[in-house]
Each structure stands twice: as structure tokens, then as C-alpha cells.
Amino acid sequence: MNTLPLFFKLKNKTVLIIGGGDVAYRKALLINQADAKLIVIAKNFNEEFLNFLNEKHHQAIKKSFDDNDISQHNPALVICATDDNAVNQAVHAAAKAHGVAINVVDTPKLCDFIFPAIVDRNPVVIGISSNGTAPVLARLIRAKIESTLPSYLGRLAKKAGDFREAVKNTLPTITERRYFWESIFQRGLNDEHIDNLPDELNRFINQGKKSGEVYIVGAGAGNPDLLTFKALRLMQQADIVLYDALVSPEILALCRRDSQKIFVGKKRKDHAKTQEEINNLLITYAKQGHRVLRLKGGDPLIFGRGGEEMLACRDAGIDCQIVSGITAALAAGSYAGIPLTHRGVATSVRFLTGCYQSDASFDGLKSTYHPDETLVFYMGLHALEKISESLIASGLPSSTPVAIVCHASLPTQEVVIGTLSDIVAKKDAAKLNAPAIIIVGQVVRFAAASLH
């Protein structure tokens, strides 16, 4: 984040604008909405601009800028909107000398602050900025947001502000108040009818104390673009987040900012919490009335022990939602250009794990391998040599293609292609690190040409 988003209160504060053309006029129209007092200095004024300033009782001064204008008018902000580079440089130098923040229009290097593209649903205001690099993109994003927000959202926010103290006096805990307001605003965002707020509050109270619930959510393979809409929505609602080691920092940052985040990750021979401890945390927090997010890498029900957590919640009488995630096998295949099934080559795919509840090594396939089958191993990088030897012993040709995909879908993704006979040596030479997916079968031949 190169700039910090802030909202200035400019009511009755002086803003000095240098320039009398269309660009300066547009800035004046915007700042006028914030009830600032405008002083505009220019040798020549657009007639429409001048009429606006007179009508709104702002001050227009027909003259050239000089350094004394800053000290004389003592503005809170300075905006320079001229097409004269020498004037722009002089205004910038004077503003800096007096410690006043300045924006020189269309000159990012001379700007202390940036005007964002604005979505205005007063009192709800949204600013979108590209830090001056792509203003057209910011405007397009604004248009997209504008199209999704109901026009009456501002009126609803105003009513909520007026009713906030009554809710605080009626609902004793912050959790109850949050549930109430989320129910109101979620319906508002969905264009659903909302009664007057006192009636809504009474209805909420009569529904009784809301118990907590658990969301077991798959965060996918690590790339935030692969999250589902439902996963993102629940991530932004949860009060408490229990997250795994495979949840990337970028995805964790998308959770509600003020949620309590607890690391419960498990790596091979290194468990922050036992599974039983995790189950107990889910149940304890939910019984306290919290919405608890169990955020897991990949899909929670594919080698993720999400089923154990689901059953623990069910046995404790806790409501539980499960949200699928893009499992690592699918991400690895897609991002490495390897179709896990392909007509005429692979008609089935089998997911296996290289980790076991005991210390027993991989002892081969539990059922017969078919040549038109793809095998995908999770958590098997540390046991690759045993897996390769066992697969050959199970009847697979040593020339069977193998791909290792590390950090699938991420910028750090690495892919190594080999066969059962040489993949261990290639893995060691590449110095690959977990997490990794191992794909075995003829479909590996379709891997992107650049990987070979």
C-alpha cells in the first residue's frame, strides 16, 4: 500500500485552487460538496466556473500566483490545476515551504495526496485509487461498484446512525449488535425490504439469542483469485478464524480485519494444535455465540480432516457449514497444463496421500493400477523415493511419466517433469520444497512445453 486512504473533514476549511479552467472547475465542484471554503486564483477564468464561484459565495481572485498567497490565505489544502509547468513547480515549492499538502493535477510526483474515484452514497463514501498510475482503471472500478450498490444505501446508513444509540442500549454485547446490524445491512445490499428500525430490533430480540456456528471453508491452493464467493463472504463475517499453515498471507488478509486469528497449522511432525484441540476450540467458541471460521488449505474434505471437524460439531449440536475449495490436485493440473483426465488417455483419476496415521511407509496401491488412470499424491514429497519404488513394484513401468508441482497456482510455482526411474534425482537437483503435488500417468506428457 503506497498511500494511506483517509477522509478529510473540510467543512468551513479553506482550500486554495490555482487555475481557472475546466480541470480546476471540476475539482472545485467536488470540494464544494464537502462544504469547504474555496479561494481560486487565476489570471483567466472559465465563465461557467466564475458564475459557480459567485453563486456559491466562494472567492475568485484574478491574478497570477505568488508565494505570499499561501501564507495570506492559510489553506488546509492546495490544488494546482494549470497547464503551465513553471507555475505548477512554483505552487508546489511554496506549499511545501509552508507545510501545506498539495495536489498538482496529473503530476503524481508533485502530489502529497491523490483524488480517488468516488462512489457517493452519503454518508457512505467509497474512494478508489490507483495511486495516479491508472486513473481510467479507477473510474471503471467505480462504475462497477456504482452498479451494485442500491441508491437508497445512504439513507439506510443515516437511519442506522440515528438509531445506533438505541441499539447499544438494548443489546448489551457487541456480538449481538454486530449480528443485528449485519442482518439489516445484508438485506439492504440485497435490495430486500426493511421495516422501520425499531420494529426490526424488536423482531431480532423476539427471535432469541443467536447461537454461534462454524464455517469449515476451503481456501484453495493459495492463490486468492481461486477463492469462491461464498468463502470470501464467510471470511469477512467470522468473529474468530482458526487457520492452517497452507493458508497464504494474502488470503488471510481478506478475513475480517478485526477478527481474532488463531494459527492451528500442522506440518509433518510439527503440530501447533492437535486435531482434538482444534475440535474443542471450534466447539467452545461457537457455544460462546461466535461465528467461527475454520480456514483450511485446498478443499476441507480432501485430506484436510474437515470431516472430523464436521462430526465433532455435529455431535456437539453446533451448526456447521462446509464450503468447498479448489483442491491442490486440480490447481496443480490446471496451472501446469496437465489434464488429470483426457479422452483416450486417462478415464479416471485417483487421489492418494503420502502421509499415514502410522509410521508405515507407502506399500503400493491398494488396488490394481490401470494404464488409463492418473494418480495424484498429496503430501508425498518426503516419501517420493518410497512411492516411486513401490509403484514400480506394483507393476507400473519405470518409464511412466511423473510431474512434481510445488506451490501450485502461486507465483513461486515450480514444476519438474520426469519418470518413475529418474524423478527422485530430478527432485533433489531442483531442491524442491513442500507443499507439492505428485502427478503420475500418461497425461503428464501434456504438460506445457516450456516445462520440459
Image (spheres, helix red, strand yellow):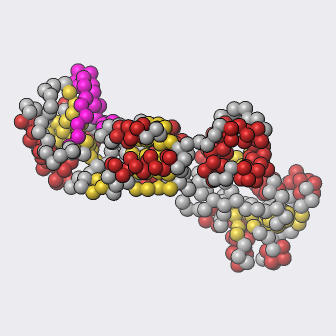
Instruction: From the viewer's side, name the closer residue of 95 and 162.
Output: 162
Instruction: From the viewer's side, name the closer residue of 311 and 359.
Output: 311
Instruction: From the viewer's side, name the closer residue of 52 and 223.
Output: 223
Residues rendered magenta in the picture: 326-354
Residue 444 visible in the displayed image: no
User: Where's the N terminus, which quadrant?
Assistant: bottom right
Left or right of 93, for residue 40:
right
Left or right of 366, for residue 238:
right
User: Measured from the top left, where is residue 451 in percent x and y?
Assistant: 25, 43
Which corner quadrant of the image does residue 386 belong to? top left
Q: Residue at x 8, y 36 (%)?
A: 392
225, above or below 56, in the image: above
Residue 337 among magenta residues: yes
Instruction: From the viewer's side, name the closer residue of 281 and 327.
Output: 281
105, above or below 289, in the image: below
User: Where's the C terminus, which quadrant?
Assistant: top left
User: Measured from the top left, where is residue 298 in percent x and y?
Assistant: 36, 42
Which corner quadrant of the image does residue 339 belong to? top left
